[in-house]
Image (cartoon, rainbow, N blue to C red):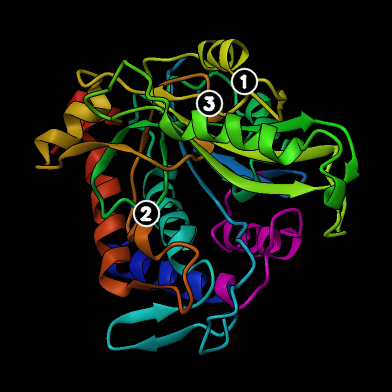
Amino acid sequence: MKPERKALQSEAVNLLKELVATPSFSKEENDTAELIVAFFERHHISYARVGNNVYAKNKWYDSAKPSILLNSHHDTVRPNKGYTMDPFTAQEKEGRLFGLGSNDAGGCLVSLMAAFLYFCDNENLNHNVVFAASAEEEISGVNGIELVLPYLGQIDFGIVGEPTQLEMAVAERGLMVIDCTAHGRAGHAARNEGENALYKAFEDINWIRNYHFEKVSDLLGESRMTVTVIETENKQHNVVPSQCKFVIDVRVNELYTFEEILEALRTNLKSQFKPRTTRMKSTSIPLDHPLVKAGMALGKGYYGSPTTSDKALMPFPTLKMGPGNSARSHTADEFIYIDEIKEGIDLYIALIEGLILSPATKK
């Protein structure tokens, strides 16, 4: 028997309140993993845990069938100093639920868990439904979704729960962080000695500021480079710095590879540079994919997302979609509307329902 929608909605909201009240900074998600485990145990659902990642498969899982993954994360950033209320107290006010992680991405997580529960005990599915609550998403950590993916079996496509106002993010920018070092020669500032590494860095930074990549995406716009950090090794006002370090935040559309970005830097920068990682590549799902078409049939629009998520680490087509608003993520007094969670559960169920029910059982 399918769970009642109202009961699912109530349980989802109550679970979110528990999650908000439980600190779960990246790499410190043990306690929220235990809350997710307890939820599955209450519903007699078999689950497994890998590190701080928790996953489950529908009761009638069949490896011969294709599988859809429902995924969101349960780690959070640390609260910023602008909070006017306790970030770990889930407060309901005027239809909003306040608290750290309520919007990013607790509302998505509990909505997907409710949708998974809705389908879990159904024998008449032509797809498997797999759920994974992942850790370390906020830091793109190696012990997050990448750690648990090998345990999930063959996944054919997935939904990544992130706050998108329930619209479809069909593409996502890639992220590459690059550490750069300009080298000079130390000297006394009063005597105009040495070779100023700071000035050398400025030359490269000015090139970065003014450079434009030619290929512009219809979904994601331009690929962009932004210098976000700069420092020298000395703190004395009268010493010409021999070394200056700076960091480039690179957001890449789907028309460029990371190697093409790095080649442009090799051709134009005088500073030494090295990418921290090349894991977070740009991704997209075809507009004619059944999952996207199902969303369009429900009246949902699509767009390219400027932010990066675990979608970048999945080697199969994924749609990023969920309740909440990305503009609220990482802000003081973060919140999500209760109605957004309810709408999220209904939308996830409707989106999945037409794809995974056997023809004889479709409404």
Residue name at image x 32 percent, y 16 percent: 214
What amino acid type should be assigned to the residue bearing mark 3? Met
Dot 1: few (<14), some (14–19), or many (≥20) neighbours within 10 Å? some
> Which residue carries the number 3 mark?
314
Q: Nearer the viewer, residue 185 or 245?
A: 185
Residue 91 lies within the magenta run = no
Give the vertical position of 53 relative to 340 (above or below): above
- Dot placed on the residue nearer the N-terminal end, 3 or 1: 1
Q: Nearer the viewer, residue 318 or 342?
A: 318
Residue 163: which numbered mark, if any? 2
Q: Residue at x 68, y 46 (%)?
A: 53
Q: State the count of labels.
A: 3
Q: Tell me if 205 is positioned left or right of 329 in this view.
A: right
Q: Quadrant of residue 100?
A: bottom right
Which residue appears at 76% of the width and 59% of the height?
A: 28
Highlighted magenta segment, given as a residue range: 19-47
Residue 177, which numbered label?
none
Depth-wise, is mark 3 or mark 1 nearer the camera? 1
Report helix, strand or loop for mark 3: loop
Q: Amino acid at mark 2?
A: Pro
Q: Residues within 10 Å of mark 2 (few under 14, many from 20)?
A: many
Residue at (59% x, 22% y) in the render: 153
Q: Secondary structure at mark 2?
A: loop
